[in-house]
Every structure is written in structure tokens, then in C-alpha cells.
Image: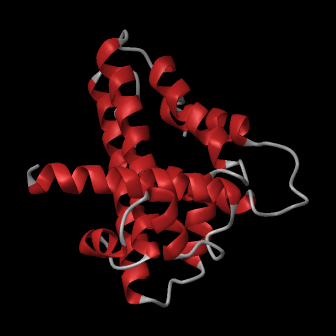
Amino acid sequence: MKNEERREITTRKLLEATKALLKEKGCHAITMKDIMIQSSLSKGAIFHYVKSKDEIYAMVLHERLEETNTKFMQETEHAAKTFDGPMQSIAHNLIALEDPHDITNKILKYLLGKEDDPTVADVLQHFYERSVSFAKNWITIGQLHGVIMENVNPDQTAEMFVLLSLGLRVRSSFASTTSQISTEVSTFMSTILKDQSR
């Protein structure tokens, strides 16, 4: 087996094992031993590719971000060039951001609590920059297809949308929060992208 194949298989096992564990426990409670047992990988195999569970958590977080982008891109490539299809893809993702049991919400909140660690700070910065980059790209694609106004500033609007999504994630941790506002956030986003009286 080639090194790249081995890396891919090991990474997939680590991600799947970690996601399964996160459904049962919180980030703090999971140990590398738990991940070893769940993934059926040896300590050496795991540490050959990652240095810590925080690095695995970051991989799970980035995987979800990539999945969201892939779904959006598929929607724009295979559907009619409309605003509604891709926006529905985004709106669906916003609903998950309000779920306190969503594993990526758990991970993000855990990593935010460790932001003083330079490695974690780098992971968070990369996640934020990648999120803004994807959002900017989505807006630009909409403008190219004529479904988002040209006067919308992709840089500023993308950053604002990412801040809103991060707010939904953090809001999910408040136990007294029972109402979902993702629909309102989605409507707000749509208004900004389509309304010329901004």
C-alpha cells in the first residue's frame, strides 16, 4: 500500500472514530486512548499522522467546512442558475449550526476555550479564513450568475455572514435558548444579497 493511501485510510479511521466518540462524550472527556480503541489504530499509527486530539478535532471541523462547500458548489453546477437552490443549501447548514449536539459545534467551542495555545490559535485562524474565503467565493459566483447584486461587497458580506454563523454556533451552547433563529438569519442574508436598498 502506498504512503498516500495509508495516510488516507488512517485519516478516515481517525475522523470516523472521533466523530463517533463525540456523539457519546464531550471533547474534554475523550482521550487519545479512546480514539485508539475506537479506530483500532495503534498509538504509533495515530501519532505518525497527528500530534494531538486537538489536531484530529481540527480535521473534523475542516472536513465539515469542505463538505458544506462541496454541497454548495454541486448545487451551483448541477442546478439552474438561480438564487434559491444554493441559498437553500446554506440555509440547511445554518440549521445544524444551532444544534448543541452537533459535533462541529462541540469542537469549535472546545477549541475556542484553548485559544491561548498557539497551535489551536492557528487552527482557529485557518478555519475562520477558510470560512470567509468560501463565503466570498459563493457570493462572487452568485454575482457572476446574475443572482446576487453586483454592488454587494463580497469581502465585507462574507465576513459578516461568517460572524453570524459563528454566533449561531456559540448561541447553541446556551441551555435556555430554545427557539431557532436560523430561518431569520437565512432571510436576513437573502435580503442583503438581493435587496438593492441596502
When the figure is inspected, residue 160 is found, relative to residue 192, above or below; the finding is: below
Q: Position of residue 24 (x, y in %)?
A: 69, 57
Q: Is residue 27 above or below residue 152?
A: below
Image x and y of residue 70, in percent: 35, 34
- Residue at the left extreme, as displayed: 2
Q: Position of residue 20 (x, y in %)?
A: 57, 52
Given residues 114 and 55, the one toward you in this image is 55
Residue 181 lies left or right of residue 167; in this view the side is: right
Q: Residue furthest top?
A: 80
Q: Is residue 2 above or below residue 123?
A: above
Residue at 40 percent across and 58 percent down: it is 14
Q: Quadrant of residue 138?
A: top left
Q: How many discs mark residues in the rendered view?
A: 0
Quarter of the image where one finds residue 146: top left
Question: Looking at the image, which is closer to me, 175 or 102?
Answer: 102
Task: Name the quadrant containing residue 62.
Answer: bottom left
Visible residue check, residue 43: yes
Q: Residue 67, position in %: x, y?
A: 40, 40
Is 140 placed left or right of 115 in the picture? Answer: left
Quadrant where the C terminus sits is: top right
> In front here: 158 or 130?
130
Q: Is residue 156 visible?
A: no
Residue name at image x 59 percent, y 33 percent: 91
